[in-house]
Image (spheres, helix red, strand yellow):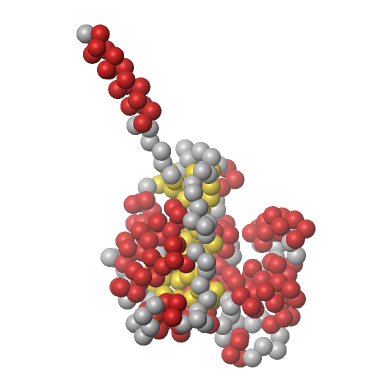
């Protein structure tokens, strides 16, 4: 009897220690209500355009992105857009997707992020295998850098060929948007009006190439940094300016120490907010 009680004690104690659930993330809606992945996916699958705001080095983001791509592919004609690819590299991307080159790095003119192999290659490879269009949406970095230095005047006098790689100029611009003001606050003395202009150029260009490559009846999933679409601004602000009749949805990502409830400061960031444990490892 004594031996049985000791055994029961150890099962109870160690069962609690090692049987604890350790969730890595939790999904909430804009109001802070918990949502399952399945419910989020079903709602998103009905939309025209989805902006998935990621934390670039977060593995949960990249896993969920691939999961969504695979699930959407079974239901809709899917188009994938990536902030991580610049518009003047679209021809190189197409050549790889079409099988004209064996390896994506064969063309040295193609600029890929340092974490491409771990974080974005799975998306591109699945798209290649299943003939899903992959759209480069971000303005070439050299133009964004020029705007960061000199403002929009840096775009004056550019050739038609250069202008074709960005949002039509002159473009709408509202420096008072919350997300742009937040950038200035976060950057403190490094924040400048020109920095916000460069951010807006990226947002406007991504919106322009999303709509330019959207086809009726399709689902366009766009992957971008979470700051580019939080609070229904950034890319979405430009999308709504150009085509307010589309069915849009947004996803934001944030880190919290606790996953049980969404902090007040994170409510309203997007239609769906992915909260990741602050201790989550990073991909780079």
Please, which residue is most extreme toward the top here? Answer: 1
Question: Closest to the observer: 45 or 120?
Answer: 120
Q: How many marks?
A: 0
**Is residue 273 shown to the viewer in this render?**
no
| Residue located 50% across and 52% down the image | 282
Where does residue 37 sit, x and y in percent of width and height? 37, 51
Where does residue 107 sit, x and y in percent of width and height? 46, 82
Figure check: 4 above or below 96: above
Where does residue 268 sit, x and y in percent of width and height? 54, 51
Figure check: 2 above or below 132: above
Where does residue 102 sit, x and y in percent of width and height? 36, 80
Question: Closest to the observer: 16 or 131?
Answer: 16
| Residue located 70% across and 77% down the image | 146
**Is residue 203 shown to the viewer in this render?**
yes
Q: Is residue 130 left or right of residue 272?
A: left
Quarter of the image with the N terminus is top left
Please, which residue is most extreme toward the left here? Answer: 1
| Residue located 34% across and 32% down the image | 19
Q: Name which quarter of the figure residue 77 lies in.
A: bottom left
| Residue located 61% across and 75% down the image | 141
Please, which residue is most extreme toward the bottom here? Answer: 160
Question: Closest to the observer: 114 or 67?
Answer: 114
């Amino acid at each position: 009897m004594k031996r049985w009680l000791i055994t029961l004690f150890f099962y109870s104690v160690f069962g609690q220690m090692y049987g604890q659930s350790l969730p890595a993330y939790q999904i909430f809606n804009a109001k802070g209500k918990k949502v399952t992945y399945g419910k989020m996916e079903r709602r998103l699958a009905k939309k025209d355009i989805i902006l998935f705001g990621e934390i670039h080095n977060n593995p949960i983001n990249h896993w969920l992105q691939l999961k969504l791509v695979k699930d959407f592919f079974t239901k809709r004609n899917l188009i994938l857009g990536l902030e991580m690819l610049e518009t003047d590299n679209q021809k190189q991307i197409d050549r790889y997707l079409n099988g004209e080159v064996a390896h994506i790095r064969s063309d040295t003119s193609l600029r890929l992020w340092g974490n491409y192999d771990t974080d974005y290659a799975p998306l591109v490879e699945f798209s290649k295998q299943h003939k899903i269009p992959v759209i480069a949406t971000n303005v070439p970095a050299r133009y964004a850098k020029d705007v960061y230095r000199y403002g929009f005047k840096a775009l004056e006098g550019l050739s038609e060929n250069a202008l074709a790689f960005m949002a039509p100029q002159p473009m709408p611009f509202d420096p008072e948007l919350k997300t742009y003001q937040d950038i200035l606050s976060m950057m403190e003395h490094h924040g400048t009006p020109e920095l916000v202009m460069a951010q807006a150029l990226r947002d406007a260009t991504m919106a322009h190439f999303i709509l330019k490559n959207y086809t009726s009846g399709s689902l366009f999933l766009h992957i971008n940094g979470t700051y580019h679409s939080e609070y229904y601004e950034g890319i979405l602000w430009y999308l709504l300016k150009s085509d307010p009749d589309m069915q849009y949805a947004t996803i934001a990502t944030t880190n919290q120490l606790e996953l049980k409830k969404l902090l007040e400061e994170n409510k309203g960031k997007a239609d769906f907010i992915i909260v990741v444990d602050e201790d989550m490892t990073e991909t780079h």
